[in-house]
Amino acid sequence: MASDRKPAIKDFLHMNGGNGEFSYAINSSNQESLIRKVHPILKEIIKGIANDPDGFPPCFHIADLGCSSGPNTLFFVSNIMEEVHEVCKEKKLKPPQFQVFLNDLFGNDFNTLFGSLPTFYAKRNKDNEENFGRCFISAVPGSFYGRLFPDQSIHFFHSSGCLHWLSQVPKDIENNGLNVFMAKTSPPNVFEMYKMQFQNDFTAFLESRSKEIIRGGHMLLTFGGRSNVDPYCNNSHVNLWELFTRSLADMVKEGIVTESQIAAFNVPTYNPYKDEVRDLVHIQGSFSLDTLDTFEVNWYTDDTDDDHGNVKARNQQSLGKRAAKMIRAGSEPMLITYFGSSAMDLIFQKFEKYMDEHLANTEETKPLLIVISLTKK
Ligand code: SAH
């Protein structure tokens, strides 16, 4: 790194933009499966609003937090509009108009997203203008750990695959040595500081949303969690970053990265246990917790469920390659900040090999997702 100043996450964290081989847009079908998985909960929320005496407002204000750039963003937007449409048809209600705010960090590739809007609008508004509420989409760049919207201006918040990203690398974990995440050899304070950072961030998230949402408004949030109370035990995320650490260690031996580069880097993510989430919602106090569920996903081994027509291509790739592409799409801008762009191909080639070995010899620990739905008191 050119200077001693620690890079700020909000400046470098974003998924790979564009539509290239390692872009998030091409490598996000797993995240799409999360949106499908929680669809029944979305449906229930929408039905609940329709059954409320106040029903839908004339203009339904929806915000998707951490929208990224790719097909998933507008996939969610179409889903929610279609559900509202269905329920309005069923109950003979006039459908609302939709104001949709797409939020992500400043470096997100909003331009690619904007480029897909004309097709989206054309499809949405063509046949449906008469009986389908019009949709107006805008972008709101900024961190969802702070304020993004005026007081009581949003009816529904959605976020999928985001809240395990922290606002910063936890403080005071310089003694984590050459680990890049919580690892078997990490000192106890590393686990504590990761946990504390998540507590602070998640609470700040709830605080900001509690001011921005209307009373009775809903939030549907899906994010990475873990199945065991022990942050080290049975955590697919830990396995993943340990394999990554091994790849980096090889590169030190080959003189491509230095130990001090590794020591300066820790991954700013945390996968909470469900009780931690429940407790934080209760302590913050602004929302009632309507649903708290967990589900496992088959991210590396499921060949059958690619909705972007990539099934053939995916089947021909090793599991390690798929995992490497997915991780690369989601973390390359961050890794370039610490290790430089010229190291990327090699890091991921090594990671791919370790991941293939790991999946061949070990029963896979499947990633666990937490989904919560909340109502503003
Ligand atoms: N919702 C999308 C993207 C998930 S990837 C989908 O379902 O496919 C996670 C996204 O969260 C990334 O685009 C990342 O830039 C964004 N993100 C992470 N931290 C954020 C923060 N503090 N504020 C806003 N966006 C954030």
Image (cartoon, helix red, strand yellow):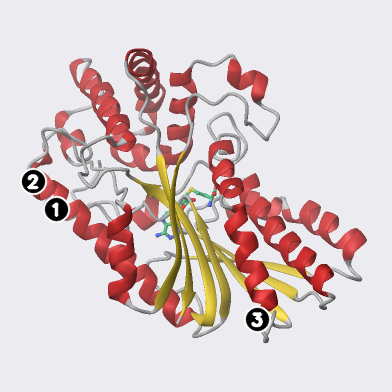
Residue that label 3 marks: 52
Place of residue 217 in the rendered image (x, y in percent of width and height, measured from the top left): 54, 77
**In the image, what residue type sits under mark 2?**
Pro
Height in image: 334 above or below 107?
Answer: above
Does mark 1's beta carbon lie closer than 8 Å to ligand 1? Answer: no
Q: Residue at x 37, y 57 (%)?
A: 10
Q: Quadrant of residue 368?
A: top left
Circles 2, 1 touching at the beta carbon (< 8 Å): yes
**Cα separation between marks 2 and 1:** 7 Å
**N-terminal of the two: label 3 or label 1?**
3
**N-terminal of the two: label 3 or label 2?**
3
Q: Residues within 10 Å of mark 2 (few under 14, many from 20)?
A: few
Q: Nearer the viewer, mark 3 or mark 1?
A: 3
Q: Nearer the viewer, mark 3 or mark 2?
A: 3
- Given residues 43 and 139, the one toward you in this image is 43
- Given residues 177 and 269, the one toward you in this image is 269
Residue that label 1 marks: 192
Height in image: 133 above or below 7?
Answer: below
Residue that label 2 marks: 188
- Given residues 331 and 11, the one toward you in this image is 331
**In the image, what residue type sits under mark 1?**
Glu
| Left or right relative to 328: residue 18 | right
Q: Quadrant of residue 208?
A: bottom left
**Cα separation between marks 3 and 2:** 49 Å
**In the image, what residue type sits under mark 3?**
Asp
Height in image: 317 above or below 100?
Answer: above
- Given residues 122 and 361, the one toward you in this image is 361
Q: Residues within 10 Å of mark 3 (few under 14, many from 20)?
A: few
